[in-house]
Amino acid sequence: MLELFEILLTTGFWAATIRIASPLIFGTLGELICERAGVLNLGIEGIMTIGAMAGWMWVYQGGDLWGGVMFAASVGAIFGLLHSIFTVYLGLSQHVTGIGITLFGSSLSYFVYRMLLPSASTPPKITAFQTYKIPYLSDIPIAGEALFSQTPMTYLAFLTVPVVWYILQRTPVGLAVRMAGENPVAVEAQGIDVLAIRTGAVVVGSALMAIGGAFITMSAFDAFFFGMINGRGWICVALVIFASWRPGKALMGAMLFAGLEAFQVRAQQISGAAIIPYQFYLMLPYVLSIIAMIIMARKAKYPQALLVPFRRGERV
Amino acid sequence: MQIEPREHMSAWRVGFAPVFAVFATLAICAVLIVWAGAPVIESYQLLFKGAVGSRFALNETITRSIPLIFTGLAVAVAFKAKFYNIGAEGQLYCGALAATYFGSGLVTLPPVLMIPFLMLVGAIAGGVILILPVLLKTHMKVDEVVTTLLLNFIILLFVSYLLEGPWKDPMSMGWPQAKSVIDEGILPPLFAKGRLHMGLYFALGAAFLVWALMRFTIWGYEIKAAGLNAIAAAFSGINVNKTIIRTAMISGGLAGMAGVSEVAGLKGYLTLDLSPGFGYTGIAVAMLARLHPLAVVPAALFLSGIYVGSGSMSRAVNIPAYISDVIVGMSVLAILVAVMFSQYRIKWRS
């Protein structure tokens, strides 16, 4: 038992927590922006896969790392645009469109990967983002080492949280996005184009999701595998509900989640832990996502116009 | 730009929407074939030949369509009630687990009873796993898409645990596979050559029964009403929650039968690669069928033909076999647009 507590005192555990949380932060914030504008984006799993492939491929073909992140974001944005043409302009089912984008996006990434690397049996590697120690701060024991000795993409993830919060809560654009998700008719009455606002939110949100995917192949690992996203996108959808659609709580949710994940990996290695087969440890994130949704379900305040397409001139 | 409903619902337009969607999909995916440096027409000819060009190919295409008919029906019924069950993949494995548990020696009955018994327990297992997501939806408003999707991952890990642990067949030379289904439970092959098995009759029977259920019974009417307008349905005295729970059980049951048919018909035993995503492809099947139970059969045959045919196409002209998954994903998006344009039109100037 004592060994389990000791895990919590190691730098490795906290550093891993922050690393695992990073892609979840990108994905959850991306989904959150879409949903605040009234669009459920179930394309997230496919868009993360596309981002993981696109960013990695950019670097593998000789591009630089930040160029890869930008490229992944652009490809994600294009898929977001596709999603919003379907769900915002044509008003089609957000559920089915999202599933379609996920099926199309992930299979297209595998196809493109195989096209460009037809005979790669062992996945080739790139030089991924290296850890960048922030001077002075990273000298603080445990917390400093864990927080300030990460890759630049992790710092970007944590910086995105206050930025998204500020834009959503403190700027006119953010207000328009939130209103588009609560009462689109009122937005229209203000002379603001609901469709444009929603499209913008889905495009930006999808770009963030793709960056989350790119984190996995460019920062956490250095290669692209099939089935690499492995449900992380769906976990982000659950985290948005857990976070009650708030960026700050999304950060906390992602951290909690990543903490449990980092903990289980280490707990497995403790003597006596092998009694429980490894599959049950791997199940934990999915089980926890469901539990998180159950806990928050009663309190969940869904954006009022989530899933409701807006057609100009039509009264709801 | 304005979207307005068409005044006349032309049966021609509605009926041909899937055909348009299929052609649009193949036209868009032609871009990928061009990219791969292969001739488009010839590649599609190879795909067609590979799917239905010989007795063997046709046999294989029909065999592969059996699980797709089941999962397509499962999705069609659920989506009709606007219950978005994306967990057919997991429910399929639950059915397979039940078939393995009861079929590998625990129960021995003559084949005429054993096969229906395995189908029944498989259906029950598929339905049982949906109880949690459906109750969460009806009683706590937790989105069923996420819960059913997450359950897929949990179930697959559970199957992996069983196959590497307590259920591992000691005779399997180290491969993670379960004990074989006993001879009485095996779905007999329909022809001397080829893999086509009796599961086809169960699949076609299921399609017919689901059609009859939706067309002629009060349950079917309630499912459609709950999906079209839950509030109106509630006002007219339909217990919407009860209807959705019932729909979920039917849907999970159908997906479970897909697992039984694969274990007891095609493979004979449970492995971790039993389904290459039949549950997800079932969504494309149901959408292409416009959620009509009888139309699920040709839609399943079409997509299974794409899978079987693209295998031989990719070998012949060197296109990555993932092209079939791209076609499946693309067709879901194409059918959405095609169906919309059969019901609405775009007015560019208001």
Image (tube, coloured by chain):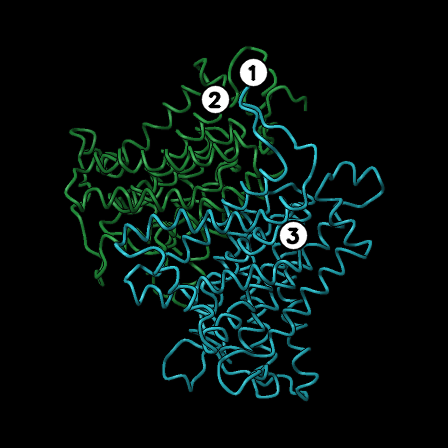
Name the kind of residue labelled 3 in the image: Ala
User: Which amino acid, mark 2?
Assistant: Ile
Q: Please indicate, yes or no, whether residue A251 appears anywhere in the rendered image.
A: no
Q: Chain of mark 3?
A: B
**Label 1: how many Cα within 10 Å (few below 14, some 14–19, many 20+):** many
Instruction: Let me know if marks 1 and 3 both belong to one chain.
Output: no
Q: CA distance from mark 3 to mark 2?
A: 32 Å
C-alpha span from label 1 to label 3: 34 Å
Q: Residue B49, which numbered label?
A: none
Residue at 60% across, 66% down: B256
Q: Chain of mark 1?
A: A
For the residues bearing labels 1 and 2, Cβ distance under 8 angstroms? yes
Residue B76 position in % (x across, y down): 63, 54
Q: Which residue is mark 2?
A: A197
Crowd around label 2: few <14 · some 14–19 · many ≥20 (10 Å): many
Q: Colour of chain A?
A: green
In the image: residue A297, left or right of residue B195: right
Chain that appears cyan: B
**Quick check: do tags 1 and 2 share a chain?**
yes
Asked which quadrant contains residue A145, the reply is: top left
Residue A187 has which mark?
Answer: 1
| Residue where numbered disc 3 is placed | B78
The spot of residue A108 in percent (x, y) is 36, 49
- A83, B244: nearer the viewer: A83
Residue at horizontal 55%, vertical 38%?
A94
- Vertical placement of A39 versus B277: above or below? above
**Which image quadrant: the C terminus of chain A?**
top right
Q: Mark 1 and mark 2: span between their CA atoms?
A: 10 Å
Task: Name the quadrant of the N terminus of chain A.
Answer: bottom left
Q: Amino acid at mark 1?
A: Val
